[in-house]
């Protein structure tokens, strides 16, 4: 292999073009852009203006077979992530998949099986794992210094979208084109972070409102109730219909309460922690005063401030392949957050509690019914900017 990783980008829409631009601006010094692929000739022409040295292909398959790349980034609509990743791995290429890993876990599990049999790297673009705020919260929770988790609540409702956003692409907000709404498009990062920080729940009960605030067929308002192995509970609330919305993650541990919130006035995330003087469980058991609260103090938690996002994930990907450095996220980890969203859909559709992992065959069957009845939009009215806001 050369000193640089020869990279092909499959799909040069909003996110794929961002990858191209990052490389061409020198932000990823160990990566050389050698090829791009897209079925839209206009997109390929636009990329030629940015990266004239890259060879252009009108199909992903042609790029994969070309020999022009050692690795690919897959930045296509969701359904294509697993099959293209499988094809690339089988062709001897390393793979970085954009989020989500796929639409349903049955498909992603097949991809993981292929990846485990391959000697090539399969990674996933969970760029929010590079965010110093979430890295610090995870460190506090996973350290065990403050005891077991008792409760977690994440309200992430600052994903506001207008109808023109959903009308900007034929695949958007349809079961056939996207496979879901806010959980599959906006929230894969938060669902991943939720389980990355707090662990996987054992069961969920959810209400996923489809087309509640917009003229779409998929969910735009979701409330998930989760239970964990130790009896702890959690809620995850998200929507694209609230304005201005909130982003507040609150985790109650035995000896502390952590609050991670986006301060809309200061335009930054803050972490505050209430450190208790002793463990809650012990205090409840031994205190002889019926109404006396356990005392503690609020402290603002500092962190290193680093937030390398997509560039950091790609640089780690290249360093892993070239030097054996660690990845930000292995591809197989992409199934965890997806399992939560699949279970939430099942729970809402069937109106009952769902154990994790969910029944993959049942989910696939019900999803196919949704796809069969999908009103896949054919008219594209506007173009919108890349989904890269403060919470992305």
Image: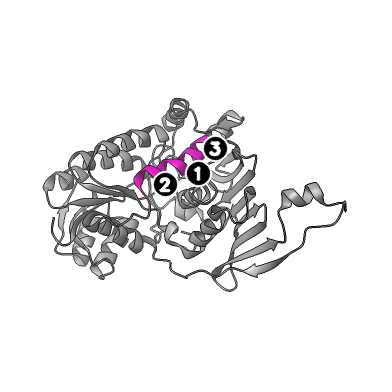
Q: How far apart are marks 1 and 2 (CA)?
A: 9 Å
Which residue is located at x 73 percent, y 48 percent?
A: 281
Image quarter of residue 140: bottom right
Q: Residue furthest bottom?
A: 266
Which residue is located at x 25 percent, y 58 percent?
A: 318
Q: Quadrant of the N terminus?
A: bottom left
Q: What element carries label 2?
A: loop
Q: Is residue 161 found left or right of 286 in the rendered image?
A: left
Q: Residue 272 carries which label?
A: none
Q: Distance between the residues labelled 3 and 1?
A: 19 Å
Front-lying residue, 302 or 354: 302
Q: Residue 344 carries which label?
A: 3
Image quarter of residue 92: top left
Q: How crowded is mark 1: few (under 14 residues within 10 Å), some or many (20 or more)?
A: many
Which residue is located at x 58 percent, y 48 percent?
A: 213
Can residue 244 be seen here? The reply is no
Which residue is located at x 51 percent, y 40 percent?
A: 340
Query: Which residue carries the number 2 mark?
Result: 172
Q: Residues within 10 Å of mark 2 (few under 14, many from 20)?
A: many
Q: For the magenta stretch, what is the residue range?
A: 330-343
CB within 8 Å, label 1 to label 2 = yes
Foreground tag (3 vs 2) = 3
Query: Which residue carries the number 1 mark?
Result: 216
Q: Distance between the residues labelled 3 and 2?
A: 20 Å
């Amino acid at each position: 292999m050369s000193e640089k990783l020869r990279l092909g980008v499959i799909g040069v829409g909003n996110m794929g073009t961002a990858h191209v631009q990052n490389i061409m601006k020198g932000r990823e010094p160990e990566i050389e852009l050698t090829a791009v692929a897209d079925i839209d000739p206009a997109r390929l022409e636009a990329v030629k203006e940015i990266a004239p040295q890259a060879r252009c292909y009108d199909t992903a398959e042609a790029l994969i077979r070309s020999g022009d790349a050692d690795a690919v980034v897959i930045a296509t609509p969701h359904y294509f992530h697993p099959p293209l990743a499988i094809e690339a791995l089988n062709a001897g290429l390393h793979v970085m998949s954009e989020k989500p890993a796929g639409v349903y876990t049955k498909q992603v599990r097949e991809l993981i099986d292929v990846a485990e049999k391959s000697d090539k790297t399969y990674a996933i673009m969970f760029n929010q794992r590079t965010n110093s705020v979430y890295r610090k919260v995870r460190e506090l929770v996973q350290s065990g210094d403050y005891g077991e988790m008792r409760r977690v609540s994440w309200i992430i409702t600052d994903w506001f979208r207008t109808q023109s956003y959903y009308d900007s692409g034929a695949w958007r907000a349809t079961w056939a084109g996207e496979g879901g709404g806010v959980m599959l498009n906006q929230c894969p990062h938060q669902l991943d972070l939720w389980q990355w920080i707090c662990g996987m729940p054992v069961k969920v009960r959810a209400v996923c409102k489809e087309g509640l605030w917009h003229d779409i067929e998929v969910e735009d308002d979701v409330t998930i109730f989760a239970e964990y192995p130790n009896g702890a509970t959690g809620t995850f609330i998200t929507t694209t219909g609230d304005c201005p919305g909130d982003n507040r993650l609150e985790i109650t541990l035995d000896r502390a309460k952590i609050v991670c919130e986006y301060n809309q006035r200061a335009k930054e995330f803050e972490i505050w922690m209430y450190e208790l003087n002793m463990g809650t469980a012990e205090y409840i058991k031994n205190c002889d005063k019926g109404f006396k609260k356990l005392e503690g103090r609020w402290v603002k938690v500092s962190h290193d401030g680093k937030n390398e996002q997509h560039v950091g994930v790609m640089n780690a990907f290249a360093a892993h392949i070239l030097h054996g450095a660690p990845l930000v996220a292995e591809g197989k980890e992409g199934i965890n957050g997806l399992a939560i969203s699949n279970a939430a859909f099942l729970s809402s559709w069937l109106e009952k509690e769902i154990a994790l992992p969910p029944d993959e065959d049942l989910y696939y069957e019900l999803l196919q019914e949704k796809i069969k009845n999908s009103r896949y939009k054919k008219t594209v009215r506007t173009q919108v900017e890349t989904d890269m806001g403060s919470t992305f």
